[in-house]
């Protein structure tokens, strides 16, 4: 897209939020450059810095100050220490709770949900949470739209899995604003046994906190002092919030976005420092907005298929959001894919890998027929079918292979009108070409590129003649 997209960023990318806001018409150069920087930074560092407008920066600072005062003057009791980690409550957390093992106190703000303290009375939250929720929520949606643009998805592709804006009557927000305080001195004094000390006397984190992954789509975070580390593409821990200005916030992807994009956007693996708080009477305070999918939605990756992306088997079956959130997702089992393939980052990654010579040697080998068919089908989908659908204002929603075999025999099938509108070949199931049997792939290719089979045969005959000529010269 630009020359900038083909270079490795020397440090975590920094983008102005105003440059990521889409407008009608063709994308501007500043929009394309900002998208490139954002996606490149997410690919290399699993995070990016978002610069908010000046007025928003002032609101962030005042909210952090309110958080410091809230935790500083708050007394805690043992019942609040035992916060449940029940995965079934993922969309219902609200109010104050604490985790003594990592010296962290949290206040969750979730619109539509009224929290109460341990005595059952109404709990007074830190000031300004509704304003900061609206501010960061709007920013998170702009960033999500920017990511969908980079993946060549249709506008607002994730709308169906997000909460209404604004919430309707009696709805509760799936997204949450978490106000956290790490290592408050009085909290440390009460729970000093929860951590161990290294040989030089510095506090260290427990091993089970070394690999944390948010289940959100994306998370926006603002802290009053550095302490968040994220693993980069090479597996190195990097301090990512050490260079945040007054208007800056950090954004990083979570497991929900990983699932929604069929593994093309990897989640950030992170950990938080809780030592080195000498001289701080408040500890380390942070505000994080987690953009979450609504519990009644499902992940099905249909938008990724419509954009021509290959979807691996583990992402092909729809999964309810509520089920996904209740499962455990070991980080060592996550499928790592080429993120944002249109930006050419994979070539840069390959250049850094030690097995480069082996990779080059395989490029000269001809592709297997099945793989060549799959790649050609994806190309035709993007170049021909999607173009027809866009011109007619049709949103492609492919069927399941087994279900569509029955649709072909029915006159009133749910996909019949779409197949007729876009000229889908008769007898070929209306599923993503990536998932079609090879015989159906051939029918699909012939329908949109007549003569494709004959052209391929001519190419193969030409290759055979060339090989014979070479062999005759050798022998």
Image: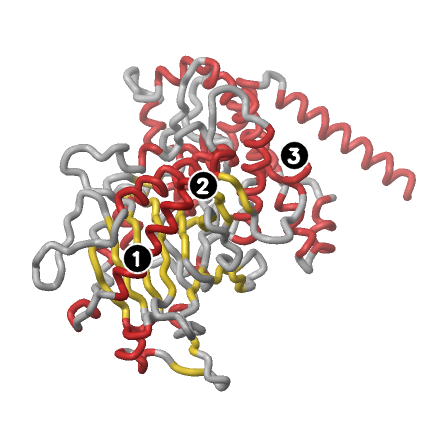
Circle 1 — which element?
Answer: helix
**Quarter that holds the C terminus:** top right
Q: Is residue 125 above or below residue 182?
A: above
Quarter holding residue 456: top right
Residue 464, given in percent of the width and then of the height, sits at 77, 33
Say few, some or many: other residues with alpha carbon within 10 Å of mark 3 (under 14 / 14 to 19 / 20 or more).
Answer: few
Q: Residue at x 66, y 41 (%)?
A: 6
Q: Which residue is outermost to the bottom? A: 199
Q: Residue at x 40, y 58 (%)?
A: 213
Residue 1, given in percent of the width and then of the height, sits at 63, 33
Distance Cα–Cα, label 2 vs label 1: 20 Å
Q: Decide if residue 304 is on the left or right side of residue 348.
A: left
Q: Going from the N terminus, do you reach mark 3 or mark 2 first? A: 3
Specify the color scheme.
Answer: secondary structure
Query: Mark 3 sits on what residue?
Result: 2
Q: Residue at x 57, y 23 (%)?
A: 383
Circle 2 — which element?
Answer: helix
Distance Cα–Cα, label 3 vs label 1: 42 Å
Q: Which residue is outermost to the left? A: 120
Query: Mark 1 sits on what residue?
Result: 67
Query: Mark 2 sits on what residue?
Result: 54
Given residues 64 and 328, the one toward you in this image is 64
Q: In this orientation, does residue 337 appear? A: yes
Given residues 200 and 437, the one toward you in this image is 200
Q: Decide if residue 261 is on the left or right side of residue 168.
A: right
Residue 327, given in percent of the width and then of the height, sits at 30, 56
Q: For residue 375, which numbered disc appears in the image? A: none
Given residues 404 and 420, the one toward you in this image is 420
Distance Cα–Cα, label 3 vs label 2: 29 Å
């Amino acid at each position: 897209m630009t020359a900038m997209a083909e270079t490795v960023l020397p440090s975590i990318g920094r983008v102005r939020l105003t440059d990521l806001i889409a407008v009608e018409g063709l994308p501007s150069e500043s929009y394309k450059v900002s998208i490139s920087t954002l996606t490149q930074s997410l690919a290399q560092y699993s995070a990016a810095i978002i610069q908010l407008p000046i007025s928003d920066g002032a609101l962030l600072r005042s909210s952090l100050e309110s958080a410091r005062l809230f935790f500083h003057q708050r007394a805690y009791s043992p019942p609040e220490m035992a916060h449940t980690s029940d995965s079934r409550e993922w969309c219902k957390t609200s109010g104050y709770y604490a985790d003594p093992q990592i010296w962290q106190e949290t206040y969750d703000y979730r619109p539509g949900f009224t929290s109460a303290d341990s005595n059952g009375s109404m709990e007074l939250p830190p000031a300004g949470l509704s304003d900061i929720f609206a501010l960061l929520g709007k920013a998170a949606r702009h960033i999500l739209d920017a990511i969908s643009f980079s993946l060549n998805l249709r506008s607002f592709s994730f709308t169906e899995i997000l909460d209404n804006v604004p919430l309707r009557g009696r709805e509760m927000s799936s997204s949450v604003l978490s106000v956290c305080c790490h290592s408050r001195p009085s909290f440390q004094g009460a729970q000093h046994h929860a951590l161990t000390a290294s040989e030089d006397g510095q506090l260290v984190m427990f091993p089970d906190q070394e690999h944390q992954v948010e289940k959100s789509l994306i998370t926006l975070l603002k802290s009053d002092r550095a302490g968040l580390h994220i693993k980069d593409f090479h597996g190195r821990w990097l301090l990512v919030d050490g260079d945040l200005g007054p208007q800056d916030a950090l954004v990083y992807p979570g497991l929900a976005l990983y699932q929604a994009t069929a593994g093309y956007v990897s989640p950030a693996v992170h950990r938080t420092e809780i030592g080195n708080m000498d001289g701080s009477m408040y500890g380390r305070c942070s505000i994080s907005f987690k953009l979450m999918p609504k519990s009644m939605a499902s992940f099905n990756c249909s938008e990724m298929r419509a954009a021509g992306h290959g979807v691996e088997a583990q992402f092909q079956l729809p999964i309810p959001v509520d089920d996904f959130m209740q499962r455990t997702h070991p980080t060592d089992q996550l499928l790592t894919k080429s993120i944002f393939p249109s930006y050419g980052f994979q070539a840069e990654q390959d250049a850094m890998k030690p097995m480069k010579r082996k990779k080059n040697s395989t490029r000269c080998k001809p592709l297997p027929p099945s793989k060549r068919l799959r790649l050609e089908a994806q190309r035709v989908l993007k170049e021909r079918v999607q173009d027809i659908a866009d011109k007619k204002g049709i949103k492609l929603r492919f069927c399941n292979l087994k279900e569509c075999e029955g649709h072909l025999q029915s006159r009133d099938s749910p996909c019949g009108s779409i197949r007729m509108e876009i000229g889908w070949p008769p007898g070929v199931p209306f599923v993503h070409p990536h998932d079609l049997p090879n015989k159906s792939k051939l029918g699909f290719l012939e329908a949109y590129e007549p003569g494709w089979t004959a052209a391929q045969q001519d190419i193969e005959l030409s290759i055979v003649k060339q090989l014979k000529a070479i062999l005759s010269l050798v022998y």
